[in-house]
Amino acid sequence: MRQLFFLIFMCIRFGKLKYLSYITNNKMTSMKECKECGKVKDAIQFSKCKAKKDGLQPKCKQCNSKDNKKFRTEINPHHHAKWQISNWDKLMGYLRKYRKADKNGIIYAIINPLGEMYIGMSEMYLKARMTEHRKHYRQYKKGKRKSLPLLHDSFDMHGIENHKFETILEVEGIDRKELENIESSFIEAVKQTGKSLNIRN
């Protein structure tokens, strides 16, 4: 628990959220060198790949994210939008699979241009949870879903595309109730700064 509160303090103290890995039961993580940036990182910072001997991608998540962003914005900016429209049922299948997969729990933040933030938890991949937030916001605008008032007001004011979605904590071997307790600790810590968007109607 001390380590958890230290992580919360560091996030708030320096005014920005960084990717943090938190391993329960004091287990040590294995290390791996990224083939792209050459940095040695915790294995948890690499996506899984069954085809590799160590079961991990050769590039770290950060480098893969940069490659994906370059493809989306420079090489073929319309590829993903077209694919999703043409393969909606397959996309929904992926999202259902993400929900059922045996994954780590995450605490994530949605941060607006003013530094205000919404804290959430999920057992889904962050990208899948981001897709859900966008879907729920569209449903709210159509009057089909209850509002997350401060968060949705922020989306209205700044545009949802101007909000950053970040994983701030990833936890192995934890059940949903424990993850909810950690989420509550982060929410309370952010509320102390006066920059919380965590109010629900």
Image (spheres, helix red, strand yellow):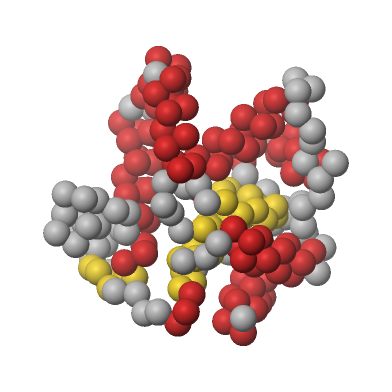
Relative to 81, residue 127 above or below:
below
Residue farthest along the bottom direction in this orientation? 2
Residue farthest along the right direction in this orientation? 201
Identify which residue is drawn at 46% across, 66% down: 173
Identify which residue is drawn at 68% across, 26% down: 138
Pinpoint residue 148: horizontal percent, then vertical percent: 77, 41
Q: Quadrant of the C terminus?
A: top right
**Which of the 4 image quadrants contains residue 183?**
bottom right
Q: Going by the image, does 92 lie left or right of 70?
A: right
Q: Is residue 82 visible?
A: no
Q: Going by the image, does 110 lie left or right of 32?
A: right
Q: Is residue 74 visible?
A: yes
Q: Quadrant of the N terminus?
A: bottom right
Q: Tell me how many marks there are.
A: 0
Identify which residue is drawn at 42% across, 46% down: 101
Identify which residue is drawn at 49% across, 63% down: 170
Q: Nearer the viewer, residue 114 or 185?
A: 185
Pinpoint residue 199: horizontal percent, then vertical percent: 81, 50
**Which of the 4 image quadrants contains residue 60?**
bottom left
Pinpoint residue 172: horizontal percent, then vertical percent: 45, 66
Relative to 198, residue 155 above or below:
above
Q: Nearer the viewer, residue 173 or 58?
A: 173
Pinpoint residue 92: horizontal percent, then vertical percent: 47, 27
Q: Going by the image, does 196 lie left or right of 67?
A: right
Residue farthest along the top direction in this orientation? 86
**Which of the 4 image quadrants contains residue 76?**
top left
